[in-house]
Image (cartoon, grey):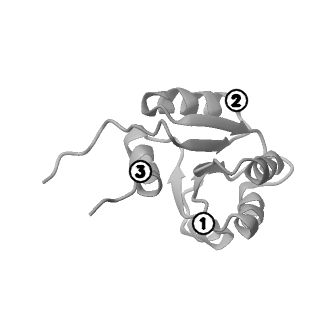
Amino acid sequence: MEPQKENFDWSEKTVLIAEDVDDNYLFLKTFLRKTKIKVLWAKDGMEAIEKCKNDENIDLILMDIRMPFIDGYEATRKIKEFRPNLPIIAQTAYALNSDYQKVYDAGCDDYITKPILGKILFQKMSRFLEKKVE
């Protein structure tokens, strides 16, 4: 079995963290620091939509589902209307099968449950950020 790659260099990538809880954002930002990825923050779904409209350099979104004003489901639907190929990973504290289906129905490409485990987050992000060279 091949060893898991632990070091990621995403210095040329940008992630938007859509998260209304300051501590959750700071945790993710600190955790992602070792990958050298540029981190942007949206505190609600409306701000996430605006940032995606105004910044074409965003490569991936970590989208909290429960946010004020516009939730993660609606924000994802709106973002996918004008950036259909932008990968969105939903962050959810709810682990019911029906919740997962709602995440995919909204247009998310993947999901991760809270509390977030770093190794799983990196694996999921690498699927979208690392180009496979065959």
Q: In this view of the protein, can residue 14 be seen by the observer?
A: yes
Give SS at disc 3.
Answer: helix
Looking at the picture, tell me which residue is in the foreground, 54 or 88.
54
Determine the residue located farthest toward the left in the rendered image. 1
Q: Quadrant of the C terminus?
A: bottom left
Tag of residue 22 = 2
| Figure check: 50 above or below 118 | below
Give the number of the disc on residue 85. Answer: 1
Instruction: Please give the name of the residue rendered at 37% of the width and 38% of the height, measured from the top-left corner.
Output: 8
Percent across and percent down for residue 67 are 76, 47
Nearer-N-terminus badge (1/2) = 2
Q: Where 130 sits versus 41, above or below?
A: below
**In this rendering, the label closer to the viewer, 1 or 2:** 1
Left or right: 54, with 133 as reference point: right
Q: Tell me whether circle 3 and circle 1 mark residues in contact (CB < 8 Å).
A: no
Q: Residue at x 50, y 40 (%)?
A: 12
Residue type at numbered disc 2: Asp
Disc nearest the viewer among 2 and 3:
3
Kindly state the secondary structure of the residue where label 2 is placed: helix
Q: Earlier in the sequence, mark 2 or mark 3?
A: 2
Residue at point 68%, 69% (across, down): 106
In the image, is residue 7 above or below residue 58? above
Q: Is residue 33 left or right of residue 85?
A: left
Give SS at disc 1: loop
Q: Position of residue 103 (x, y in %)?
A: 62, 65
Q: CA distance from mark 3 to mark 1?
A: 16 Å
